[in-house]
Image: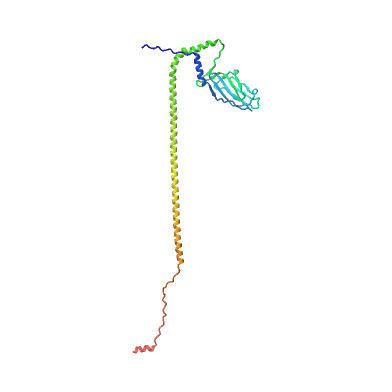
């Protein structure tokens, strides 16, 4: 079988690459930043506002809420390092002043401001900004003349063809290593979180069981106390009843004895006999008896 020749991969043009990069970066182009303003000037207030950085188009946008304030009373005095706005000419006085984030520098002269009656939008072209990941300052390249533009464009496109080819082969390995490291880190974090969740669940279950035991013992003790009290009450009631019964029986006996009549006994008492004194014999009779 004849071997099929490998078809050479078509190299995409620089314009197509730029267009794809633009499309992919449109989604993540905007980034909202929280800016901490300076204190308001005496007699003024800080209005509501928000800031956005457009990295792809290199623009910094500031939106300030100013309800029912005329255009003539709004004062805009920004610089390359700071933003400053005030409404001192109007009765409702605002003042907003803050530094640009990430060591940003802006072309204040090229600022464009729009006011629709409620919000003031100011857009500044970014000339310098610091990258969060690397910490390097990124500056915008300035074009001195129109003749340098065609010379610079091919230089930028030719460099990736010669020097970027070997780097592309090494990039997947580095990316793979970083991806594996990130995956391992994420797995470790997930395991730690799962272990913590399991521990918390076990603690909750143990606490619930301890609570159930405590309440059960408490209820048992309360029931025992109730039963003891009931027994004591019943015993006291029985004793009181027995005492009452005894008293009633004694009272009945006394009543019966009181109701019966008293019967005199038929015993005859012997009367004492009267003793008669004996007469003394005369001495003549005594003598007669002796003679006989």
Residue at x 37% of width, y 88% of height? 285
- Position of residue 288 measured from the top left corner of the image (x, y, whole percent): 36, 89
Q: Along the line of sight, which residue is nearer the eye, 95 or 21?
A: 21
In the displayed structure, would residue 279 be above or below residue 19?
below
Which part of the image, by quadrant, shows the C terminus?
bottom left
Question: How many marks overall?
Answer: 0
Furthest residue in direction left, as rendered: 292
Residue at x 45% of width, y 44% of height? 219
Residue at x 45% of width, y 50% of height? 230
Quarter of image, res 122: top right
| Viewer can see residue 131 | no
Which part of the image, by quadrant, shows the N terminus?
top left
Quarter of image, res 87: top right
- Position of residue 47 measured from the top left corner of the image (x, y, whole percent): 60, 26
Horizontal side of residue 205 vs 46, given as left or right: left
Residue at x 44% of width, y 28% of height? 190
Quarter of image, res 88: top right
In the displayed structure, would residue 161 be above or below residue 233?
above
| Viewer can see residue 201 | yes
Colouring convention used in this rendered image of the protein: rainbow
In the displayed structure, would residue 261 be above or below residue 148?
below
- Position of residue 140 measured from the top left corner of the image (x, y, whole percent): 54, 16
Q: Along the line of sight, which residue is nearer the eye, 260 or 145?
A: 260
- Position of residue 196 measured from the top left corner of the image (x, y, whole percent): 44, 31
């Amino acid at each position: 079988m004849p071997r099929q020749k490998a078809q050479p991969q078509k190299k995409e043009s620089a314009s197509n690459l730029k267009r794809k990069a633009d499309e992919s970066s449109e989604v993540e182009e905007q980034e909202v930043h929280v800016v901490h303003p300076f204190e308001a000037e005496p007699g003024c207030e800080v209005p509501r506002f928000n800031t956005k950085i457009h990295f792809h188009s290199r623009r910094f946008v500031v939106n300030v809420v100013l309800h029912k304030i005329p255009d003539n009373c709004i004062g805009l005095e920004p610089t390359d390092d700071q933003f400053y706005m005030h409404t001192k000419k109007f009765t409702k006085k605002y003042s907003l002043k803050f530094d640009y984030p990430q060591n940003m520098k802006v072309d204040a002269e090229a600022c464009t401001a729009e006011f629709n009656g409620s919000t003031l939008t100011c857009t500044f072209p970014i000339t310098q900004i610091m990258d969060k990941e690397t910490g390097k300052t990124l500056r915008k390249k300035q074009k001195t003349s129109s003749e340098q533009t065609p010379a610079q464009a091919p230089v930028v496109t030719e460099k990736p063809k010669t020097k970027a080819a070997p780097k592309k082969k090494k990039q997947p390995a580095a990316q793979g290593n970083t991806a594996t490291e990130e995956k391992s880190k994420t797995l470790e974090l997930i395991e730690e979180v799962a272990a913590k969740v399991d521990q918390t669940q076990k603690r909750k279950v143990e606490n619930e069981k301890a609570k159930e035991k405590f309440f059960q013992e408490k209820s048992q003790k309360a029931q025992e106390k109730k039963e003891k009290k009931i027994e004591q009450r019943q015993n006291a009631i029985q004793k009181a009843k027995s005492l009452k019964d005894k008293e009633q029986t004694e009272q009945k006996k006394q009543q019966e004895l009181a109701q019966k009549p008293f019967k005199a006994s038929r015993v005859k008492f012997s009367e004492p006999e009267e003793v008669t004194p004996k007469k003394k014999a005369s001495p003549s009779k005594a003598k007669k008896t002796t003679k006989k």
